Amino acid sequence: MLNWLGMPPAASAHAGEIDQMMVLVHWLMLVLFVGWGAFFPYVLVKFRAGANPKASYTGAHGKFAKSTEVAVAIIEIALLVFYAIPAWATRVKAFPAESEAVVVRVVAHQFAWEMQYPGPDGKFGRTDPKLVTADNNIGIDRTDPNAKDDIVTTNQLMLPVDRPVLVHLSSQDVIHSFGLYDMRVKQDAIPGMSIPVWFIPNRVGEYEIACSQLCGLGHFRMRGFITIQSAADYQKWYDAQQKELQPAPTPTAP
Ligand code: CUA
């Protein structure tokens, strides 16, 4: 519906709400743009030196200017109170219950995204920056019992469709920003903080995670992928990951 605005596909339950607000703001900006654009040449002609040899030191006294200003202020307040604040309040207060949501940790670092799923026990295993190596980017401690069933992936977030997702977002180094344009989600990842982010993906497909905060020389390539699958396909992936985590069976003596 909003293709004319150049918006990316809307792939989350709350995307429509954000887009609607975006449209209203654009309409207001269009009206202001046309208004100011017409006002400028009008002033140039009306107050030209030829018609006004002597400057007026008191200025214009129109009622129109004041009422227009008030009207614009009222529209802006309405946008804030009826659209922006309620939409934001849902994002930061109405979190889904951990029991019904897919809970995942997303850790940003220069220049990739690390995902950690708690596994069937529902508990995130310990991670420690000291354990970070080239093949353990998130620094997971596999000796921790809670970590044994944790799934970790790099630059690939797998999620089921139509189920709330609760992301605990953090960073290992500098400030990054978790940008899911198709989900209308954007949140800074800040070192030392774990910030909850939630949304409900509602369209199966492949989307991108774009780092939306200049975070260093490799910022441009800090790109991840988010795959939204049917519940069954997601479960298949999840089970396959769990299988891989099982310790290899010890060969029995012949
Ligand atoms: Cu991370 Cu830009």
Image: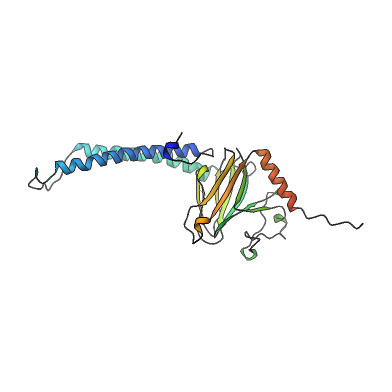
In the image, 83 versus 33, the foreground residue is 33
Residue at image position (79%, 55%) is 248
The location of residue 75, given as percent across then percent down, is 34, 37
Q: Which residue lies furthest to the top in this view?
A: 1
- Relative to 252, is 147 on the left or the right? left
In the image, 174 versus 220, the foreground residue is 220
Q: How many labels does the image show?
A: 0
- Relative to 111, is 35 on the left or the right? left
Q: Which residue lies furthest to the bottom in this view?
A: 130
The location of residue 147, given as percent across then percent down, is 70, 56
Residue at image position (76%, 53%) is 246
Q: Which residue lies furthest to the left in this view?
A: 53
The location of residue 45, given as percent across then percent down, is 15, 42
Above or below for 152 versus 236 = below
In the image, 77 versus 130, the foreground residue is 130
In the image, 113 versus 129, the foreground residue is 113
Residue at image position (59%, 39%) is 204
The location of residue 39, given as percent across then percent down, is 22, 40
Residue at image position (72%, 49%) is 242
- Color encoding of the figure: rainbow
Q: Quadrant where the C terminus lies?
A: bottom right
